[in-house]
Image (cartoon, rainbow, N blue to C red):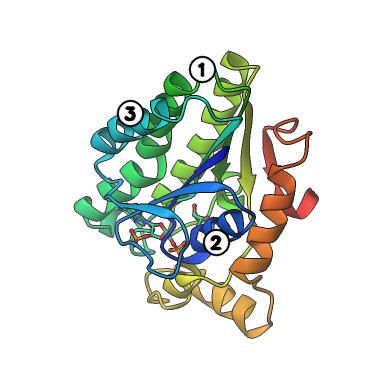
């Protein structure tokens, strides 16, 4: 049995990853606030802004599947706070974005590593962003989360040489998150026009095409050789 855990499974890239992995016959657990009835996967409706109970539950679930051939954690869920200056961002929104985007991946990775020690093949895929590597005004928390995921992955790869770990930028994808960037107030978010331009120029990938490229890359033997990577170079 090959196990995959996908966070942010209800929409966008996470839904496409969950569906494609399940269709390939793998055992997939999806985690998001809402379940997606169309997905052929086990789903937990959990708020990852409260990651401790999610990590505890995941650890127990993985321990019950300790005999699997491979286990893969995909930290995909992320939450954008309203695009705009940090000083004008609601504190509650900021806190949720930081907890979903960075605290949860660290906690879930900890649970995953502790519960799968005897599993022959283990992988952690963190879905990062170009914005973890290139700063953008109006998205300070998001930039920090993604840079944090990249550096967490580098440190974890040093600790866990037997686990394939990669922090992967997925390119620009036509999902709700892009809609949120295009829909932002240009007076607060100076990059709004650039995101609108990407959509108008047809430069967004579909979630399905991006997921297919990621699944292909994930299942290659060299997955994890480049810890901080970009699907467009894979
Ligand atoms: N779209 C892009 O162009 C782009 C570019 C670079 C990187 N990325 C990265 O790719 C990943 C997927 O992005 P996407 O574009 O598919 O985003 P999306 O369409 O906004 O979907 C986000 C997913 O995260 C889940 N999520 C949000 N808040 C959550 C919470 N509190 N608890 C549990 N789950 C939560 C959502 O489910 P619920 O609402 O049901 O909870 C949803 O399934 C993210 O890490 C994003 O940063 C995207």
- The residue labelled by disc 3 is 60
Instruction: Kindly indicate the quadrant of the structure image that contains residue 201.
Output: bottom right
Lower sequence index among marks 2 and 3: 2
Question: Is residue 191 positioned above or below 28 on the image?
Answer: below
Residue drawn at (77%, 40%) of the image: 220
Horizontally, is 75 left or right of 99 in the view?
Answer: right
Does the residue tagged 3 have its C-beta within 8 Å of any atom of ligand 1? no
Q: Cα distance, mark 3 to mark 1?
A: 13 Å
Residue 130: x and y, percent? 61, 51
Tell me the distance, in whole angstroms, between the alpha carbons under discs 1 and 2. Answer: 27 Å
Q: CB at mark 2 closer than 8 A to ligand 1?
A: no
Q: Earlier in the sequence, mark 3 or mark 1?
A: 3
Mark number, residue 19: 2
> Dot 1: within a 10 Å radius of its alpha carbon, few (fewer than 14), some, or many (20 or more) residues?
some
**Residue occupying the point 42% across, 78% down:** 183
Quadrant containing the N terminus in the rendered view: top right
Compared with residue 213, is residue 209 higher up or lower down, i.e. above or below? below
Q: In this view, does 65 lie above or below 93?
A: above
Locate residue 92 relative to residue 103 in the image: left or right.
left
Q: Could you tell me which secondary element the residue under label 1 belongs to?
A: loop
SS class of the residue under badge 3?
helix
Q: Is mark 1 within 8 Å of ligand 1?
A: no
Q: How many marks?
A: 3
Image x and y of residue 52, in percent: 26, 33
Q: Do the residues labelled 1 and 2 touch (CB within 8 Å)?
A: no
- Nearer-the-camera pick, 43 or 33: 43
Question: How many neighbours does mark 3 have within 10 angstroms: few (below 14), some (14-19), or many (20 or more)?
Answer: few
Residue visible at 34% across and 62% down in the picture: 35
The image shows residue 146 at horizontal and vertical percentages of 51, 44
The residue under label 1 is: 117
């Amino acid at each position: 049995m090959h196990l995959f855990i996908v966070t942010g499974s209800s929409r966008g890239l996470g839904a496409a990853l969950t569906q494609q992995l399940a269709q390939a016959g793998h055992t997939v657990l999806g985690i998001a606030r809402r379940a997606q009835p169309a997905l052929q996967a086990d789903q937990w409706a959990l708020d990852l802004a409260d990651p401790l109970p999610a990590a505890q539950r995941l650890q127990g679930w993985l321990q019950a599947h300790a005999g699997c051939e491979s286990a893969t954690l995909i930290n995909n869920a992320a939450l954008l706070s309203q695009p705009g200056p940090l000083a004008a961002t609601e504190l509650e929104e900021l806190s949720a974005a930081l907890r979903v985007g960075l605290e949860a991946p660290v906690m879930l990775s900890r649970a995953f590593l502790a519960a799968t020690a005897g599993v022959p093949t283990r992988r952690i895929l963190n879905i990062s962003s170009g914005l973890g590597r290139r700063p953008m005004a109006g998205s300070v928390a998001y930039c920090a989360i993604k840079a944090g995921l990249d550096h967490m992955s580098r440190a974890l790869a040093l600790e866990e040489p037997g686990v394939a770990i990669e922090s992967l930028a997925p390119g620009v994808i036509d999902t709700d998150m892009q809609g949120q960037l295009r829909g932002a107030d240009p007076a607060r978010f100076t990059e709004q026009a650039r995101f609108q331009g990407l959509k108008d120029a047809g430069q967004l990938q579909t979630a399905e095409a991006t997921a297919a490229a990621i699944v292909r890359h994930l299942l290659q033997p060299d997955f994890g050789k480049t810890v901080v990577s970009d699907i467009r170079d894979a």
